[in-house]
Amino acid sequence: MKNRFYMALMLGFASIAYPASAGPMERDLLLLTQWFEGQFDNEEQRWFQNGPYAKIPEPEQHVRLHVFHKKLSMPALGKHVFYVEEYQNNDPQDIIRQRIVIFTTDGKSQTIRMQQGFFKNAEAVRGAHINPSKVESLTADDVFFLDECDVTWKRVASQFEGGMKPKSCIFGTGKDRRYSVHDMWLSPDKYWRIDSTFRVSDNSLFAGKPIDKPYQLRRAKPFNCQFYFFADNGFDAQVVENLEMHSQGGTVTATRNVDGKTFEILMRDKEYPSYKTRPDFLYFSLREQGQKRSLAFTVNDPDSRQIGVRAHSIGAFCQRKGFNFREPLELLEN
């Protein structure tokens, strides 16, 4: 694995609480699995590749990729077990990967091992990031592991780097016999990876991108959103609520009953390398579906927990999941 990609960190190691008796490897394992959990998306990479500055031809661009890493309760397999589900092209039905992964430490090599389990009936566990019991109820007969395809992780400075042993994960037959390159870089808010296969015969690229062009995913913040379609009196409203979306190019829609028009909320968590002042912000837009022009938009701090706009008779509001917005007054005063 080549140390080519170093990612700026937004958080420090000091924010993690370790058990007093934890050794270096156990601390690294805890930190790695905390960073691994969540959802990630490369919408911003796609946005820049499609922009006027990059001018990257469509065949060379990365596809849109969204990744879920859901921690599971499966003590028989270990303390750090995750379900992985990925879809492409911003279509949750276009699923391209489902795995169960197990993290353990290897004291001899001073590394962290990630085993990858493959489902014999992947269709049956679709959506397990929402309903973990689909996976947690499985038996050993429902999953198989390939030791040759394990990923080894190691902390390098303030990030983790992982990869398979060179030419160890081999499959296929004849001229299409190929090996997998699955190199990864993980920080608190970024997850980059190479996910390609190469022919064993001549090392030519079989599928995926060259090893110097990784997928650049960023952590997606989950939000819960609502639409309010107000009546002419300004008070009575059609309310559409409990809409889940994420900050990395996520969208949700709702249809107004009185005229059948559909409206959309769009959220983008942006990092602009060319801006010198406030380069990072959370963009929030309300628009009629199919229109590029916003009815209203706002630019917010990246750590915003509540965002909302109102355009005439339409209100759109989102709250960051995982936070309590009904704190008692005495707590707010402290």
Image (cartoon, helix red, strand yellow):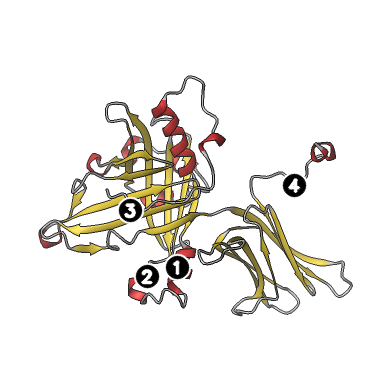
| Extreme residue toward the front, this view | 276
Residue type at mark 4: give it: Phe
Provide residue 237's location: percent of width, then percent of height: 81, 67
Alpha-carbon span between mark 2 and mark 3: 19 Å
* Among numbered discs 4 and 3, the one appearing first in the sequence: 3
Residue holding disc 3? 4
Alpha-carbon span between mark 1 and mark 3: 20 Å
Vertical comparison of 16 with 256: above or below: above
Residue holding disc 2? 61
Residue type at mark 2: give it: Gln
Query: In this rendering, which labeled residue sits more in front, label 2 or label 3?
Result: 3
Q: Residue at x 51, y 24 (%)?
A: 19
* Among numbered discs 2 and 4, the one appearing first in the sequence: 2
176 relative position to 47: left or right: left
Residue holding disc 1? 46
Alpha-carbon span between mark 1 and mark 2: 7 Å
Element assignment for label 2:
loop
Quadrant position of residue 238: bottom right
Provide residue 65's location: percent of width, then percent of height: 43, 61
The answer to whether the residues at label 4 and label 3 have Cβ atoms under 8 Å apart is: no
**Residues packed near mark 3 inside 10 Å, few (<14), some (14 to 19) or many (20 plus):** few
332 relative position to 175: left or right: right
Vertical comparison of 298 with 185: above or below: below
Alpha-carbon span between mark 2 and mark 4: 40 Å
* Among numbered discs 1 and 4, the one appearing first in the sequence: 1
Residue type at mark 3: give it: Arg
The answer to whether the residues at label 1 and label 4 have Cβ atoms under 8 Å apart is: no
* Among numbered discs 1 and 3, the one appearing first in the sequence: 3
Query: In this rendering, which labeled residue sits more in front, label 1 or label 4?
Result: 1
- Quadrant of the image containing the C terminus: top right
Provide residue 320's location: percent of width, then percent of height: 65, 52
